Image (cartoon, rainbow, N blue to C red):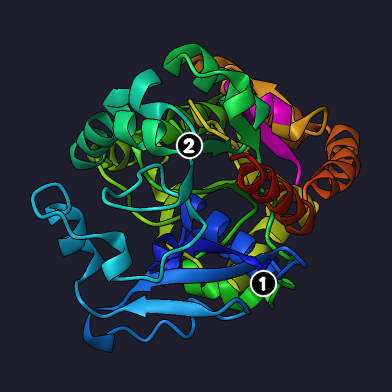
Amino acid sequence: MGKMKVALELQPICGKRSGIGNYTYELARHLKDQDELEFYGNLFNFLGRNNNAQALSGVSIPIRTSRAFPYGVYRRIWHKIPIPYEAMFPRADLSLFFNYIVPPHIKGKVATTIHDLTYLRFPETMECKNLLRLQNDMDYSIKRSSHLLTVSEFSKREIVELLNISPERISVVPCAPAEQVPAADFSKIAEKFQIKSPYVLYIGTIEPRKNLVRLIRAFDHLKKSAGIPHQLILAGGAGWGNEEIYEAARKAEYTDDIHFIGYVSAEEKSTLYASADVFVFPSLYEGFGIPPLEAMQMSCPVVCANVASLPEVVGNAAELIDPFDEADLARGVQNVLEDKEYADLLRARGNLQYKKYTWDNSAQQLIRVCKNILEKS
């Protein structure tokens, strides 16, 4: 009997990658063929117009490309025109999808990844088109899947509770921080991003779910009440619905000390973590939450929301705060900034905590899941 073929849908790795794209990329990069399994990736590239070499750098599994449609067009028409998935990609024994939705008209076994249930818990924090996509296509995707993947025990409990799915149908394949990119010369980063003083750091998408309006207000309060000399540096790509966030920064009393610096490279990110006095992650809801672990990897003390998956991910290595309470958020940041021994303790704990999560381990877990799915008749 030949090897079983496992196809990974790699579309999320293209463009500026954030959470789901990084998850897809790192698993693809760390998977290796087994005695029983042969892995390859599927990627849409209409007429070969996109140069995906950089996006695929480090991915050693073979890539099958479909030049027939742009992916966005295919997604818009797949309910109206019954195009078999096998018309675009070779049939696999198991197809893995990492961004919730399974396309129709696909043969073989299927597993999809449900990272979190924001669309049920906090629908108001989602962009309308993404919310509608999940509302319209999740039922089919779950029914079509032989098995479901998720990224934390918290998300597994959410799926069981809110979608009424048996725990046996769900496997946890956790995220991990990316391999550490050495920090660059901070003076160059400081000049580029106009960082002129010690700073409090946030890295992540600029969007409502990340709770940045409360972070800005808490920072403003700390500047006023505690006289901290810091700037607030907010790094990350602009998501949707961020007008209120930018407006809060404009209206802040210390608006000149609040800087949005946009999407940053891996090297810039490492440098920002390494030189920050504290990293703050006040997100209202995360299926996993990689940035706190990335900060720990660079020996930066972390203040983190005490909700959703985040306590599971950070363990005892972060100052936990109530993300709905601006005063508690300010208190947590102040605790770290004013107590050097406590900040050093968080650094030491963080150095142990982030090592609990590696992409090699997650890839091995995914291999076990694939074997289990394929062994079932």
- Position of residue 79 relative to residue 49, above or below, is above
Check residue 105 in the rendering and tell me which mark sits there, or answer none. Answer: none
User: Secondary structure beneath disc 1?
Assistant: helix
Amino acid type, label 1: Phe
Q: Residue at x 74, y 34 (%)?
A: 314
Q: Nearer the viewer, mark 1 or mark 2?
A: 2
Q: Nearer the viewer, residue 326 or 169?
A: 169
Q: Is residue 343 left or right of residue 183?
A: right
Residue 154, horizontal then vertical, whole percent:
62, 24
Q: Is residue 314 magenta?
A: no
Q: Residue at x 50, y 22 (%)?
A: 159
Identify residue for label 1: 186
Residue 86, horizontal then vertical, whole percent:
32, 65
Q: Is residue 308 magenta?
A: yes
Q: Which residues are magenta?
A: 300-312
- Position of residue 288 relative to residue 234, above or below, is above
Q: Residue 254 appears in which quarter of the rendering?
A: top left
- Position of residue 320 relative to residue 181, above or below, is above
Residue 48, horizontal then vertical, whole percent:
28, 87
CA distance for labels 1 and 2: 38 Å
Identify residue for label 2: 114
Q: Nearer the viewer, residue 32 or 1?
A: 1
Binning the other alpha carbons within 10 Å of mark 2 as few (below 14), some (14 to 19) or many (20 upward) gives: many
